[in-house]
Amino acid sequence: MKALMSVAALIGAVGILLLAGMIVDIIPSNTVRLVEGYMPMQVLFELTLFVAGFTGLSYMMGSMGMAVPRFWQGILFWSFILLYLKFRVYPPIPFSVRAMYGTVSLIAVFMWVSANEEDWKKFKQPIMNILDAQTGANKLLRYAYLVLLPILIGGFSYNAMVPKSEEPIELRTVHPAPPASTKVHGKTYTLQTSQNPYRVNLEGKFDQEYSNANIVEQGMGRLMKPNANPWDKDAQGYLKYVREGGEIFFQNCHFCHGDNLNGRGLHAFAFNPIPANFTDPGTIAQLQETFIFWRVSKGGIGLPNEGFPWASVMPPWEQHLTVDEIWKVILFEYWHTGYYPRTWD
Amino acid sequence: MKNSFSLKAGALLATAFGIILVSGSTGGVAFAADAVPEGFKKAELSPEPAADMIEAGKRVYFTKCVWCHGVDGAGDGPGADRLWPRPRNFNQGTFKIRRTASGELPLFDAKKPIPGQNDLFETVTHGLPGSAMPSWEGILTEEQRLQVLSFVTTQLVKDRKFTDKQSESQTVLQLDELKPIAASEESLKKGAELIVEKKCVECHGAEGRGDGNAFNLKDDWGFSIQPADWHKCWNFRGSRQDPYNVKNIFRTFSTGVNGTPMPSFADNSTVEERWHIANFVNSLCEREADGKPLSIDPLADKPKINFVVSSGVVEGEIPADPEHELWKNRARRYVAMGGQITHKPRNFVNRIDDIWVKSLYNDKHVVFMFQWDDRTKSVAEGKLPWAPTSVNVDVKEQDPKTGEEGSIASHQNNYTVYNDAIAMQTAVKWKELPAPIKPRYLFGSNEQFPVDIVKWEADGSLRAFEGTGWDKDFTQRDTYEENIKILHSEWKNGRWTVIIQRPLGNKKDQDYDEDTFFEMGQYIPTVFFAWDGHNGDAGRKMAVSAFYYTFLEPPTPREAYIYPVVIAFGVVLLEGWVLTRRSNKRKGKTL
């Protein structure tokens, strides 16, 4: 038990030192790099390690006779979570979201310290001691708090009132409700009934099952199925159209949406909102193919009113591509990300 | 047909040239046994990758790489013709970023994904910043990256063989063992002298903005190539996502960039000299005012962006001299620029990828200082064939598929030259726009919500327009032009500095329906546009920023001094109340 705990304590200590080093900028923040794709799992794993580490640390300090009072454990753990959210997680989380996480974790910490009457008493004890000021040290502390608290709170409110220039927060509907139909190149397409004319099997018939069987495999890398290479000279039907769609994608779309369709193209860094990441399960994977057809054809300028602010640089692709080319690009996007388009039923 | 013929001829010529070179260097070795440049060591060639690795790599290649690099790895995939630099043609085995001596193949070993021992693996892992080659880390696993490289090095590199001991050798820069020299003032001074002595400035320009000899350089395939701009180290291809690391510069300087006019300086400079040069080049990269490196966004490998351009208040005149204290002390903002790719003609290759903006204001005017790197000063010869207000001008966009000869890379040094220009677009009546307040991105929504565009051109003109939609010609606003002024405009050593003054505006003196009012403490939506004349930029072929906000910093209000004191006093009262309650309760208990 002791050996296990001391290992955990070591992990905890190293973790805290690393994090502290990153906060004060002695250790470069990419020492342990967060890598896209692994990021959520990495963060969860790190947090688990930290919790294990803290358990070990508190156990070791307890057995060395330097037990940290429950009161300080609670406060330290909560401030650790706040610091971790602010300095470790990347891309940075906006303050409003951090405040929400902070509140939730504060409640969790309170639940932890007040799990039973005895714990709660232990937690309250230091506060009561200061209020009662029975010893000289506590008396001193009480006076210090009396003076420091007003100064601190006054300082915070001054800080909040001094004019600052922070980017206004903009909320936008990422997937606005689609219209019933859309007119592209003179022809009207009803979104509920239209189909991608290139999602066809070898006989040239619309066949979602066939195309779904030939998309790239999920999992790291998202590679094509070994026997479904769109670059095969003899590729016919679905796979041939995937290749043609890919050609159009890499002549037009990758500048923003990126070589891996993850929204990290050449020009992406300059734009706000950033281009959509198709590999994210929250984009094309949840949408119908005809919805994409409408969004691609009409672009940022064709967004309905709830799609404000009209800051998107997404081109209305009907200005650049034919209807056939648009359908092929959509076909390619689903192939390359390994997602199935949602169906209407 | 003709195309492929000339290519073959080129390849033949290159091979012939290569043979002469190789025989030349072997002759040299015989003359001075084992003449290895300082800092280098001879190494063994790596073994051939296993057959199953190669086969697996083919699958990776045809999923991810073929789209740009092409079926035969000739850098002629579907995406190639609209890219500059073009995707690498693997066939000749010419790779830019290496630790091996000039002309040699890069380090690659399918069994050693170790940083510092595997150049190609690092290139795929970190990508080539400033080009379309992304970082594949987190997308492809380590194994998959090694597999695809096994395929590329054995199947697509056709003119050379990584394992052929007869023709290939590896002389490796011992980068991990060489200790960098601290970037002291003395070292920087020596570096500054050395870049003149070694003629770096001939291509990279007097201030290192890549503006020397910028349009006469060609790579091995005959495509125009630009010298690096040392002030944007995050765009260095060999920056390995660690742009402020001096070792990367030392490596590139020591080994050269194969296939380009950038030679290796290993033979004619000592290791010490190379460190001085690397230190100096590194010191030129843009930094914060306190000398710290800019923080780089790891997702984009570019400096992090803040979308608020804040303007500082000044008493009296705003200086026209960019060297004035007030300008020097003013914080600057990095404004990222992408190509205009929304409407035709799209700009796939924008040569201006950022602008530094500063702003000051007084009781009458708001002044913007724009500084951006542009390798050439471009002023159109004669009169432009369209009116200044024209939006739909006759500039063609690059066709999607043209073959190498018609590609965007071969057009780079023969565009019709137009004016360099910069413009800022602000929303008119921005307070009335539905929340969040922004007009349509490009040139305004409609007549109800127009935008105000102030455009400066390198021919010395400064004009004000009203924009009412992306395809609507501008309306020129003479009445407003009387009130705007160029305080300063200068192109020097690859950098433009332009200072534009415009009225703050108020309801009394100006036309509310046409002018943008710069109201203190408010966020005014602002977009920046830039044109590079030598890139053939005109009309909608330009570089664009996202929506930024202009924010005139208000002075601290008096309330900010009063309320905190009141609050602090309230806290004291609260404390007294808590203490009294507690002590009463205790007394009650003990009694």
Image: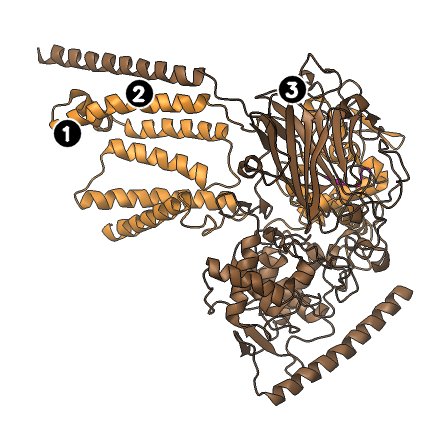
Chain colours: A orange, B brown
Tell me, yes or no, whether dots 2 and 3 are on the same chain.
no
Q: Which residue is mark 1?
A: A137
Report the front residue among B496 and B88.
Answer: B496
Residue B485 screen position, x and y as percent: 72, 30
Residue A48 left/right relative to A333: left
Marked residue nearer the N-terminal end (2 or 1): 1
Q: Distance between the Cα atoms at labels 2 and 3?
A: 38 Å
Per the image, label 3 sits on a secondary structure element best described as: loop
Classify 10 Å Cα crowding around label 1: few (below 14), some (14-19), many (20 and above). few
- Residue underneath mark 2: A150
Q: Chain of mark 1?
A: A
Q: Nearer the viewer, residue A61 or B349?
A: B349
Decide: is B529 above or below B362: below
Residue A98, above or below B278:
above
Mark 3 Cα shell of 10 Å, populated few (<14), some (14-19), many (≥20): few
The range drawn in magenta is B539-543
Q: Quadrant of the C terminus of chain B?
A: top left
Q: Which mark is residue B435?
A: 3
Q: Quadrant of residue A181?
A: top right
Alpha carbon of mark 2 to alpha carbon of mark 1: how far? 21 Å
Within 10 Å of disc 2 (Cα), the crowding (few <14, some 14-19, many 20+) is many
